[in-house]
Image: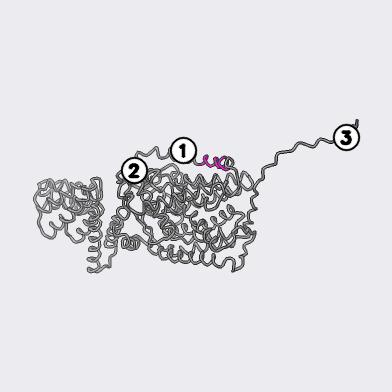
Amino acid sequence: MSKKRDRPTPPPKRAAAPVQETRPASATPGRFVWVGLGLAVFAFLLYANTLGHQYVLDDPLAIGKNELVKKGISGIPELFVQHYRAGTEGAGASALLYRPLSLVTFAVEWSIAPGSPFLGHLMNVLWYALTVALLFFSLQRLLAGRHWLLAAGAALLFAAHPLHTEVVANIKSRDEILNLFFTTLGLYAWARWLERPAFRWLAAALGSYFLALLSKESAVVLLPVFPLAGWFFFKKTARQSFGYAALFALPAVLFLLVRAAVLSKTTDKFIVSEMDNPIVAASGLGEHMATGFMVLWKYFQLLAVPYPLLSDYSFRHLSVVGWSDWQAPTGLVLYGALVFLAVRGLAQRQLPAFCAAAFLCGVALYSQMPLVIGTLFGERLMYAPSVWFCLGAAWVIWRLTGFDLSQAVDNARLPEAKKIGAGAGILIGVAGLFGVLTVARNADWRDNLTLFTADSAKAPNSVRLHNGMGSELYTRFSTEKNLSETEKNELLSQIETHSREAIAIRPNPVSYLNLGNAAIARNRYSDAIEQYQKALDEAPNYGIARTNIGRTYLAWGREEGQENHNIPRAVELLEKAVEYGMSDANTFLNLGTAYGMQGRNEKAVQCFEKTVALEPNNQTAWRNMSIAYRAMGNMAKADECRQRADALR
């Protein structure tokens, strides 16, 4: 029997290790500095024509009328522990906002150049140019493995997009600019950490995101973008993507705690009016949702075709709609398709799916469906979401023109013209058209009157734009000293026209106030009081209308006494002025003089005493009081008052 030969036992088979998807190395940033610099210069030049502009819209409320901002650098600590408009009288709903970072930049600028709109506009343009350059470098880092022309095309479209004119030309919108700048910086640092974990990059990412939150609360909705970036661009597992990105909950929670502590000190309630956001008048959930999808459609429409642009989309330029309005179902279908694209492309890590998902995160807060915000529609609200629209648009253009985006290169040299000619031509053409629209739209933001003149013509049903025109025209009437009578009459006629058109759409206190101002300018005192009273009927707490009634009675009373010599009527009107809150020295002097001419010397003395209590050096009041005391037979007092009057000569 043969002996079996011993054979070596083979080692047990090991389970095959999972194949790890490798991510191409990122391009060396230093080799692309000229691209980022070129994009930044392009962005700066597009907005250079805003540098000579004035303060517009809410700029004075955030800067010139904000007492904390006007303290300059010394006011910065208080800005971090107060709500957004704490330094502005009559903050209203803004008391429920916490955005200290933009106010801090305004305070620094006020310390350098108090009341200078030039510095504010310059800083907005510089921040914007830096954002464009940073966006290119951040997208290039995220898109490693794809040609750098994709990131450059997206940044080019973003830089030129006319929808950003409100953000850059309106200094107050610094909160939007800083929000996106620090979010983009956070994405860049996050990408560096995902490539090669290092504490400095993690700290930079979390710190940048916290600064974005301090700039504007809406940065909260961008929280999902960080895990999505890990999944789509860095081939992380779902557990890794969301596990790592959970770290961003730390700055978000910290911000929300600080915000809650600060806002707990105010008793103001957030009340949205129909004039600001017409959706509050929706009759039921169906109409509310239809209006929300109409709004979403219009946002996408303006991203694709940014014309015409407006500074205001409130009542009644946009109104509540039902599902019979074609824009509502169109919006539903469009955003349903975006959701489908995002979900379907998730497993394949497709770039269009990421763009759709990030865009949906950005617009969710402004759809009016999670919650009703203070405005129905605003171009500034699409500033951050437009990044992902521009990235998606650049991807589509390059793909449709046949350029292979998978050709990752580590230098900034351009491919052969025949490979990129069509795509580059379209991108440059679109950016050129956008740039022309941007520069032209910037001119409208020169000052309030220019802006309202341009926009009221495009939105004839906007109550707020008509009112803005009326108010600005009256300001011009009141401040320009060299106007001819013809020019004055033309301005007053325009005020009356815009005010009546607004009232025809909806009666409101501002329109009645403007009509009252026009009437008093024409010395039609009775008409002025009637209009001011209508303003008070619309808004009983509208203090300026009550004050203007008092001023009208004062002017009317002086005319009746000094020009018409109707003393009883003058007394009646001046007493009405006091009744409506006129308690200044001039009013009491006029009323006292009228009482004296009626022989009511005791009342005259009471008025003169109130006058000198307010203005101790009012020589006329002392002299008239001497005359009244003498008529009453009180010679000692008469002599005393006469001596006081003589001492003031």
Q: Nearer the viewer, residue 298 or 627?
A: 298
- For residue 285, the mark is 2
Q: CA distance from mark 2 to mark 1?
A: 32 Å
Identify the residue at horizontal 57%, vertical 47% (top origin): 190
Task: Kindly report the distance in space between the C-alpha atoms of the residues bearing marks 2 and 3.
Answer: 85 Å
Disc 1: which residue: 257
Residue 204 can be seen, yes or no: no
Q: Residue furthest top?
A: 1
- Disc 1, SS: helix
Q: Which residues are magenta?
A: 241-251
Q: Nearer the viewer, residue 176 or 517?
A: 176
Percent position of residue 349, x then y: 56, 49
| Residue 635 left/right relative to 506 | left
Q: Find disc 3 in the rendering and name its residue.
A: 5
Disc 2 or disc 3, which is closer to the eye? 3
245 vs 409: above or below? above
Q: Secondary structure at mark 2?
A: helix
Q: Position of residue 439 (x, y in %)?
A: 43, 65
